[in-house]
Image: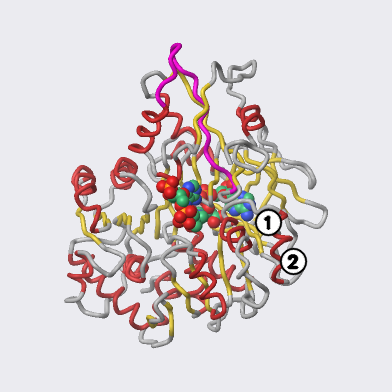
Amino acid sequence: MSNPLYDTLFGRHFGQETPFLHHADGRTTTHGAFLRLAAQLANLLTSRGLEPGDRIAVQIAKSPEALALYAASVQAGLIFLPLNTAYTATEVAYFVQDSGARLFVCQPDRTAELEPVAKGAGAMLETLGSDADGSLMRQAASFPQSFQTCPRQGDDLAAFLYTSGTTGRSKGAMLTQNNLLSNAKTLCDLWQFTDRDVLLHALPIFHTHGLFVATNITLIAGGSMVFLPGFDLDAMIANMPRSTAMMGVPTFYTRLLDDPRFTAELTGNMRLFVSGSAPMLTETHVAFHKRTGQRILERYGMTETNMNTSNPYQGERRAGTVGFPLPGVELKITDPATGATLPDGEIGVIEVRGPNVFKGYWQMPEKTADELRADGFFITGDLAKIDGDGYVHIVGRAKDLIISGGYNIYPKEIELVLDDQPGVKESAVIGVPHPDFGETVVAVIVPEGKDQPSADALLSATNQAIARFKQPRKLIFTDELPRNTMGKVQKNLLRDQYGDLFTSAGKAG
Ligand code: MCA
Ligand code: AMP
């Protein structure tokens, strides 16, 4: 009996003392050592009564041990549910409860705050810290270093990733072993990864980009990763000469380009730079090429679908485009009103179908039916056109979504918090251009009476409820919101009005 995801990513490296994770301090963890730890963790998890199909929710700092917990979950047939470390206890409570997680793993320093969350959801609680500290590692040491891998099939669920929606209620995207495996194999081939690759890994490992794209591809290729805890400019520059590839959000690239130490010479050993998760400006692509002589490869994906398109590895990487549909992925542009396929050159919604497309939203059949057609096409909500050469150009979004530094922010979630505050009649949250994060959050607020509510009180309310990265960077008070004849708030007008708040033309700096 097999477990395709474990066998392909991890199992075949068992016992191999080849380098897998290079740490910032110069130490290296081999595949063998990593998998022995994963096996200890898998033994520990099953000893706590976890069974195949159970959910394990984790909100832990990026570390080799955190990655080993992912491997352990795959080996034990569990459904891995990673959560952004920036989420507040209120946000986490929803995910743990909604997923029905049997175990929740948090950072040791947040135990007091998160214990009631686990208790409220009826989940067990364990801890794992960034220095290999916490209850999991303490117990794992006494367990065997090998584990009888739980049999799984390609169609079995491997992970839940929560993604917010326009209603403000997060949905758990159910990803199967095959979803992850098929996409990682395709990308590994397309981007020509081999066991000689050293991936400079600075992305978080609670999202598709850092966990499934970067890590799974490296594992399939048998390569290694410089595994940084997060994006740190000095560490990126120090480790670039020993790396061959990097994956990042556009903010990574603009930050690197802002540093004079980032030169063609520094990137001499690098063969591939990949960008995604948010639109990259053409000027970034051009400036990067001018500085390094290399062209960033931009690709496009979603939590629900993994990666859908990519610029070519060999061939023209066209700035402002996300390239071609991946092998095995069907892509069409449709009329948002009728669903009819549009001819090339016309703007419509991207729909995709393929082995990469998720199984649906956890316990939300209606939401699933709204976005995943019976014929298997997933309606992405991204607006695009296909040019005469077949390149896909993303030109906007049909969904009300802000992407800040590669993190998705759904305005509705913030509006619900603001509208609930005393003195607020209504609010509209918009994304405006930002030099570092691409877009940032601005809240336009209509007071209830004559007196403006205190900005501090509103910011403190959002601070209680939602992660820092989602909080408005500016509050604007106004008498009324612009509306169309149907009564719908015209956010495009607000974006036009406040669009230069954070750019050099604007006043807020
Ligand atoms: C941190 N802050 C942010 C963000 N990150 N605010 C808005 N947007 C953000 N993305 C806040 C911090 O809380 C802090 O708040 C302040 O900004 C400055 O923090 P800083 O030190 O500059 O941040 P950082 O630690 O350097 O992080 C910036 C980052 C990070 C490196 C761009 O956000 C990041 O790693 N982003 C990658 C996200 C990602 O992996 N996305 C993939 C999603 P204060 O100081 O005010 O308290 S997967 C996906 O989208 C699909 C599938 C796909 O296609 O890949
Ligand atoms: P998420 O739901 O976090 O997986 O974010 C997916 C969304 O990120 C997509 O629906 C797009 O709107 C956006 N996205 C990802 N890659 C790109 C890209 N290369 N260019 C523009 N938007 C992108």
Closer-to-camera residue (19/434)? 434
Q: Which residues are magenta?
A: 438-454
Tell me the element at label 2.
Answer: helix
- Above or below 508: residue 267: below
Where, by quadrant of the figure, is residue 422 drawn?
top left
Is 361 located above or below residue 257 in the figure?
above
Q: Is residue 121 above or below residue 109?
A: above
Mark 1 vs mark 2, CA separation in Å: 20 Å
- Foreground pick, 376 / 302: 302
* Rendered location of residue 178, percent (x, y): 48, 63
Residue at 73% across, 71% down: 293
Amino acid under label 1?
A: Val
- CB at mark 1 closer than 8 A to ligand 2? yes
Judging by the rendered image, the residue that carries numbered circle 2 is 290
Identify the mark at residue 220; answer none if there is no mark: none
x, y percent for residue 148: 28, 76
